[in-house]
Image: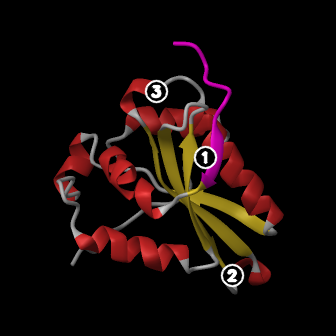
Amino acid sequence: MAAISSIIIRRARRDDVGVIVGMLADDPLGSARERFEDPLPQSYFRAFEALEHDRNIQLVVAEHGDGAVVGCLQLCILPGLSSQGAARALIEDVRVATHCRSRGIGEQMVQWAVAQARARDCKLVELLTHHTRLDAQRFYARLGFQPSHVGMTLRF
């Protein structure tokens, strides 16, 4: 597939929530945890409102030149005392619409997030990917990310 060079990365809007949830649900892991139905559960819109008002979190979408939302990610800036008071960035929920994968959109979004982290004076960028997402791990390694931590989860 040809690369898509004409994407715009912008803050997500309330009317993007359905498309974002659709992308989050579009794989075996996401389909087990998301409720992509019509109408969407209100919990997604409550979460969007909280994200929209948090100055340390940016939920963004990649919009194709025709206005279609074809990707998303969430960038969190985390202040901390560790590493001499350094802020760190956390990239989460990187998704590209199935029909647009392998066209450079994910790379453009991650590079955008890294640039934002630098602009906010973060000393470290972290991201999480499920241990079963081997393609995603190869993608992040190609972008310069290195395995470093063992992640653990406690679900309620």
Question: Does 87 lie within the magenta span?
Answer: no
Q: Which mark is residue 100?
A: 3
Q: Nearer the viewer, mark 3 or mark 1?
A: 3
Crowd band around label 2 with a 10 angstrom C-alpha radius: few (<14), some (14–19), many (20+): few
Task: Give the amino acid type for the residue marked by disc 1 in the picture.
Answer: Gln
Local secondary structure at mark 2: helix
Along the polypeptide, which appears first: circle 3 or circle 1?
Answer: 3
Q: Which residue is mark 1?
A: 146
Helix, strand or loop for disc 1: loop
Label 3 with label 1: CB-CB less than 8 Å: no
Q: Inspect the image, locate mark 2, and give the three-letter code of the amino acid beneath it.
A: Ser
Q: Nearer the viewer, residue 150 or 13?
A: 13
Vertical arrangement, residue 149 with respect to residue 104, above or below: below
Mark sitting on residue 45: none
Q: Where residue 56 sits: x, y (%)? A: 63, 76
Residue 96 x, y percent position in the rendering: 46, 38
Around disc 3, counting alpha carbons within 10 Å, would you say few (fewer than 14), some (14 to 19), or many (20 or more)? some
For the record, the magenta segment spans 1-10
Horizontal arrangement in the rendering, residue 156 relative to residue 150 (left or right): left
Q: CA distance from mark 3 to mark 1?
A: 25 Å
Q: Main secondary structure of the magenta part?
A: loop
Say which residue label 2 marks.
Answer: 82
